[in-house]
Image (spheres, grey):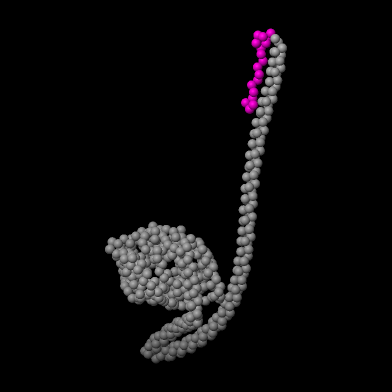
Amino acid sequence: MTYYEIFHETLASTSQQQIASAKASSWDSKHPPGAPYFLEYLPLIREQGGIAGFDPSLSYERFIPPSGPSGPVSEAESAYVRTLVEHAEQRGRIPILTDTRTLGRVAGLKAAAPGLHAILYRNLFRQWCSYTEQSTCGNPYFLDTITKIAELSRHDPVIRDLLRVFPVERPSATDMNTFYLFIFLHVHLYAHATAAADLVIDVDRLSGDAPYRAEIEETFDGQNIRVDFSNACPSTAYSLVTFPCRADMREQIQIISDAIIGKMPSERGRTFTAQAVADLMDEYERHEFYSKRLRSVLFSMQRDKDEAVAAAEEARRQGADLQSEHDRAGTERDSAADLQAECDRSGRAKDEALAAVESMRRQLADLQSERDRFGTEKDEALSAAREASHEAETLRSERDAAVRDRTSIESRHRRLDQDFASLAALRDQLTGERDAARAATQEAARERQRVESRYDALLHWSLAFHDSTAASASWRLTRPLRWVGIGRPKRPPKPDFL
């Protein structure tokens, strides 16, 4: 059982009638004919509308987990996914969950719902061209999702930096910042998603590489899922974004992409994303070679279309005014048919209507004059744009100088860090030597005290020994005492250290 777009925002309020009407033929999808997109959700629709267990925040607010693309998903996401899986398994079917809004949480979903996790990858420039084509055909939905995802993922430091460097007030297919934000957002997401996925499917290769297509089909066949990609065909639209200097654009994409990829710990994610950036630039060069002139034609057609729409709107407004005047004149003419006096008044009303028509013609002439003035102002605006481009070039030079200065400052800072480390090491060495000297001094003081104590003891013993020697000599001279054997002097005891 294949679920289409499990995190699509319409699932929060969809009904049975809306599910029946949402299909490939209801918009310029380029999808093959088939059943309605959300047909498999019919048993899960609640009485009040919406899919059971689906919360609106699952679409974009939780696009990237709080701890980043490699972090765990919320319990709400896990419970919702389990509901879909159990619904399919209860019917004896293999659940297949799909969505374009899972690119920022592949690792978390893989942990919450074990199985084969595959990513569909398309050349980033071709995908941008598809977004552009949809926008120029009156469907800005896909361009709007770029800023919507980024704004609701500011907790991710990489995306927060991208929004600061490439601010987008209103997404546009001709805006460079919109293009850069699209590219770097997907570089960041693909770096993490491909590291976590079990299988990465290059949809561009499915159409022209038969062995690759057979390999992918065999992988699914190993999961008891039979798929047939033989009708896959390449599709490339057009891009309307232009760059003052293509070399600067290539350099900027390479530098920022390398910075984003360099933060990725997975070798697989880094390798895949680096190749995706290279494929993007190759596809851009091919597009510029074959379609550069087509872009100017498209711009001209878009301007002609806008002018035609404006002219048609003005014509409708003038026709409505004339019809109003005509209806009023008709009413006055019908009223004048009953009375001759009213007939004269109808004539005056007719003259007034003619005068009004003449006034409208003069107003039309004024509008044409105003259009010419707008053309002059447009030329002035183009001149101002060229001046702005020159100023941008100057700012770019100043930016390069600032980058060089920053590099020099960083180099000096590194040298200072090295000097500081050397001084810290010297300080630690001197501190160790000081502590050793202090210990030696204290040991010498203790040794001195021990020597002095021994010296005092030896001195006292020597004096006592001398006194006992003198007494012994006197005793020996006293023969009677010596004969009796009494009063013999005693020697003092020797100190312990002798």
Residue found 53% across the figure and 69% down from its top:
254
Question: Is 269 displayed left or right of 413 in the figure?
Answer: left
Q: Image height check: is 468 above or below 231?
A: above
Residue found 65% across the figure and 17% down from its top:
490
Residue 104 included in the magenta stretch of the image: no
Q: Horizontal and vertical percent for residue 1? A: 31, 66
* Magenta span: 480-498
Residue found 66% across the figure and 25% down from its top:
457
Q: Horizontal and vertical percent for residue 144? A: 45, 70
Q: Horizontal and vertical percent for residue 483? A: 67, 9
Residue found 47% across the figure and 63% down from its top:
267
Closer to us: 408 or 237: 408
Task: Name the quadrant of the C terminus.
Answer: top right
Q: Horizontal and vertical percent for residue 289? A: 50, 80
Question: Is 260 displayed left or right of 113 in the figure?
Answer: right
Closer to us: 148 or 355: 148
Q: Quadrant of residue 142?
A: bottom left
Q: Quadrant of residue 35?
A: bottom left
